[in-house]
Amino acid sequence: MKPNSLGSGESKLETLISYLLIAGVIVSLILETVGLILFCRFYGHLSIRLEDNSMFIQGQNFFSFLHGLFSQERLWSSGVLLMTLGIATLMLTPYLRVIASALYFVWKKDARYITITLFVLIALTVSLALH
C-alpha cells in the first residue's frame, strides 16, 4: 500500500472545494469592485436612497429577486447589477460547494454522505426560496 493512496479521494474533493470557494470569493470581489466604480461614476457618490426599492429584496425570495433584477434595464449601467451579482455569487458559493460534494458522493456511491449532503442541499434551497 502506498502512503499517499489512503484518503486521496477525499483530498481531491477538499482541493476542488477549496478552489471553488476561492474562485467564488474572487469573482464576488471583482464584481463588487467594478460595480462600486460604475455606481460612483453613474451617480457621482456612493450613498443609496432608501426610497429606491430596486435594490432591496423585500417581499421576494432570493431566486425571484435575481430574476427581477435582470429585467430592470436602468440597473445595467449604474453598477447596482454587478454589486448585486457579487453578493449573489458570494451567497451561492457555499450552495455550489454542497452540489459539488453531492456529485462527488454520488460518484463514490456513498449512500450515507449522499443522504446528508442532499439534506443540506434541500435545506439551503428551501432557505433561499423562502427568504
Image (cartoon, rainbow, N blue to C red):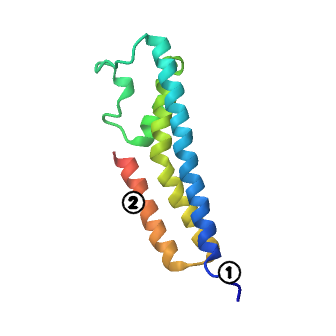
Dot 1 alpha-carbon crowd within 10 angstroms: few under 14, some 14 to 19, many 20 or more: few
Q: Quadrant of residue 14?
A: bottom right
Residue 114 appears in the rendering: yes
**According to the image, label 1 marks what residue?**
5
Disc tally is 2
Tag 1–tag 2 contact (CB < 8 Å): no
The structure residue drawn at horizontal position 61% and vertical position 60%, both measured from the top left corner, is: 16
Using the image as rendered, state which of residue 89 and residue 127 is in the foreground.
Answer: 89
Identified at 43% across, 38% down, the residue is 64
Amino acid carrying label 1: it is Ser
Q: Nearer the viewer, residue 50 or 31?
A: 31
Seen at 35% across and 30% down, the residue is 56
From what the image shows, is residue 74 above or below residue 31? above
Q: Compared to 46, does 62 lie above or below?
A: below
> What is the quadrant of the C terminus in the image?
top left
Residue 33 percent across, percent down from the top left: 51, 28
Q: Which residue is mark 2?
A: 123
- Which element type, helix, strand or loop, lies under badge 2? helix
